[in-house]
Amino acid sequence: MTTNMRVPDSWSHHFLEPPKLTGTLFWLHGTESPEELRKTFDLAVGSGIGELTLESRPHWDYLGPKWWSDLKLILGWCREAGVSAYLFDEKWYPSGVAGNTIQKLDPAFRRSSIRLQYIRYRGPLNRVSLMPPWTHRSRSVVMSVFAYPMSEGVIGYEQGVDLTERLHRPDSPHMHGIVHGIHWDVPSGEWIVCFVIEDKADNYIDPLHPGAVQAFIDRVYESSKREVGAYFGNPVRGFFFDEPAYFNHEQEIPWGYELRRRFIEAKGYDPIRFLPALWLKGESKGSEYFIYDYYDFLNKAYADTYCRLIHEWCRNHGLKYIGHWYEHEASPNHGERYMFHERTTEGPGDFFEVSRFADEGGIDVVCNQIIPGHRNRDYWGLPKLASSAAHIYGLKDDLAMSETFGAYGWHLGLRMMKWLTDWQAVRGINHFILHAFNPKWPDLDCPPYFYDGGLNPQWPYFPAYIQYVNRLSYFFREGKHVASLLLLYPGALGHAGESTPIEDVQQVLQENQYDYDLVPQDELLLSRIAGGRLEIRSESYAAVVVPGTEVVTEMLLHKLHEVVQSGVPVVFVNRQPIGVLKRKQEAMPLSPFLSGPGMHLAGDPSDLPELLRHSGISAQLSFEGSGRENLRILHRIREDQSLWMVSNEDVETVVDGWIRLPGIPDVNALHAWEPLTGERWHLRSRISPDTANEREFHLRIPPYRSLILIPSVLDVQEEVQGPVPAAYTRSRQQHGVIDIDSGQIHFNWQGEARSGLPPWLRLDPSYSGTLAYTWTMDIAPSELEALNRVILDLGQVEEIAEVEVNGTSAGFSFVPPYRFDVMPWLAPGLNRFKVCVTNVVSNRMSKAEVLEDAGPDWKERREQFSVPEDGGLLGPVRLEFHHIDWK
């Protein structure tokens, strides 16, 4: 891989003044005055937001005259201000029901699902009277009844006896005399009688019913065209969808409009007799092919019926269709390793099937599902779903969107927001839609709202955060993503047999700086092999990693064999498949396909890195040092120039070591750009002691920090162009240190002069605001003359610190380490220091009277969203005196 390694001039300009690429949800309730709407609009746009998603939350007159008048008012302001807009396509969520009106238009539009009841018998038994399940005829019906023989605990579906027609015989009353029964003579042996019941429910539409989907399009999309179509294109860029799915209950499986007929057309056989296998997997050996077929059909039918129709409408009107599904980890009652992105219920069945019909990859990050310092399964894979979809489907500019921060609560301050942004951006998210700007106040509906009626003390620093997001969004979209590995997304294979959770594999790859894309089977089958690599559109991979699957399709097996024969390694994790999904055919031998050079087995995910290195597969960035497991990387090429995002995801320890850039020759310098502060410098370098003539660079990233790295072939006379920022320095080459006695640090607490560094929670758990800490210090002229740098280290701060020295600002930070270069503002003699510390608004909200009676359940919601957090300057505070230390 070669690039020109000349930094484009436009990059420096956009680094200092990034375009306004960050979006936000803008809530409309219908109760706000034009003045209230305008104030909130000005706050959002003035902070650096460049895009609004206009959402009913919920508007009292959704799709009525007041809704349209509110939209037109704000869309007019957007056009004047050059701000883009998306229209939320639902009254609240989930998308698809237009405020719960669509499913009421026609009984056939109601959500449909099936469930199983069964009875076991040992024959022979004569004149058995089977009592069917009780049903409410208007909403449910016994769809089929089959009696199946069992042999050694395995159900014989092909030999099943169809008893369905006996349900309605008038001469077959049940012994209780209440309902009709089924009279049946049980033959010899073990038998199981299975009733499959179809249920209808009003909580959602049947997304497999094209009439229901068209009714939704007519009600929302077409009416939007009639009322605000003049704004389509400018400023309206498209529609935003939110969490459409199936919404069947536990132990229910989605069914839908003419599903039986459509399945027969797609798969070539009738599914009706095999349906119990969807529940009785342990007793359905040999029927894995049907389970795969059913979910493969179901997932494709959902995408084709619901997603495609809406996507095509948007495309035909020159608009984008963006949003997200339920895609994250389910609650424990769903079972271990239940991930919505590959299941029904709240999920779409298969994240990638539905993502084929969207203009951006999409996820949401809400409800504290990701917390700094804690790592659930979502932690590893959630953003990679969206970014992988953008890559493999060739979406414009590789855009991957996240609706982020919803219902995190008021304890979410800028420090946590910055960490969550980095966590997503380094996994490929480059379009952020923040949750939310809310013109209604007070409100307890899923905060934070950032401004909070003027009560949020962090609001003055919010524009700095938006500038940071705009920088990351600009640099890591467009161009080309670079990854080593294709990681197979199991999809319907995960229903047909056991498989290793992809999140377990993703963890190991990320901790060892191997980047990858999640790729579904259909896209892998379409891939091409060129130059010893596997290619999908503009993506190129050096190897294929398959999370251990119990079964594979015949097409996949042949493709993996072809891949290996072409020189691209295939690595199975935990296990190789033991079966091929085929119906009524002889067993297919696997060994000829899964043995030989190029086919590998990693017995555990932790074995992957060594196996990959042994196979000659390099990570995106080679790192030797401390903190490897916390270092995350993203490599892209823009304008023929490579750039990396590197991030330390730990909240306590430093990443510190030496890096090399595999495949990038002749690198003489590596620029480090700090997107939070706008600082830039060159990393210290050396010739690698292990590899002759290969240069490596020293990388040090404190907790909560991320850098953009840009290589260069420039002949740099001096290894370091400018000073390493104070936050990135060690206490090396220091001339001396002065620990500031906390008793000499003064502040005013509610009118009372105090000293010391007590935690604010101890002083008043309900306090949110800004306090100024002051102290003075004498510095001899001789000391200043001998020094090149003085760093003020504030130690622990909760959570924003802004420093003044002798009345002049020395900067601020809302993430650690809170270290500031104060040398330019020091003077011989007495120096005055002032540190203004700001905490989160959560403490104030926990006791705020304005939130009382803000809703019927205000006490519960206020407690949920207002967790008190500590505040204050906690130290220790010290001054470090340095000789110049660029390193």
Image (cartoon, rainbow, N blue to C red):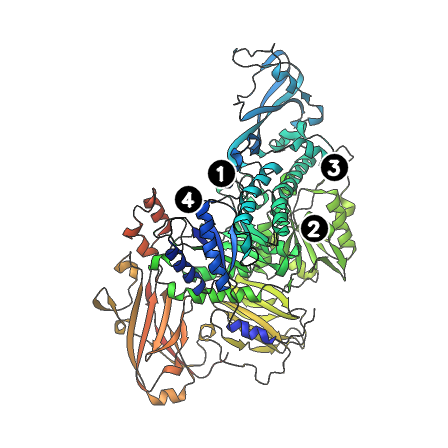
How packed mark 1 is, by other alpha carbons closer than 10 Å (few <14, some 14-19, many 20 or more), is some
742 left or right, relative to 272: left
Task: Tell me the residue that label 1 is attached to.
Answer: 100
Cα–Cα gap, marks 1 and 3: 42 Å
Cα–Cα gap, marks 4 and 2: 44 Å
Disc 3 vs disc 4: Cβ atoms closer than 8 Å?
no
Task: Tell me the residue that label 4 is attached to.
Answer: 60
In percent of the image, x 66 and y 55: which residue is there?
Answer: 392
Q: From the viewer's perspective, is residue 558 above or below residue 885?
A: above
434 left or right, relative to 144: left
The amino acid marked with disc number 3 is: Lys
Secondary structure beneath label 2: helix
Q: Position of residue 720 (x, y in %)?
A: 54, 81
The amino acid marked with disc number 4 is: Trp
State which tag comes first along the sequence, 1 or 3: 1
Task: Tell me the residue that label 2 is attached to.
Answer: 523
State which tag comes first along the sequence, 3 or 4: 4
In percent of the image, x 56 and y 55: which residue is there?
Answer: 232
State which tag comes first along the sequence, 2 or 1: 1
Q: Position of residue 730 (x, y in %)?
A: 46, 74
Q: Position of residue 708 (x, y in %)?
A: 55, 69
Q: Residue furthest left?
A: 752
Cα–Cα gap, marks 3 and 4: 54 Å
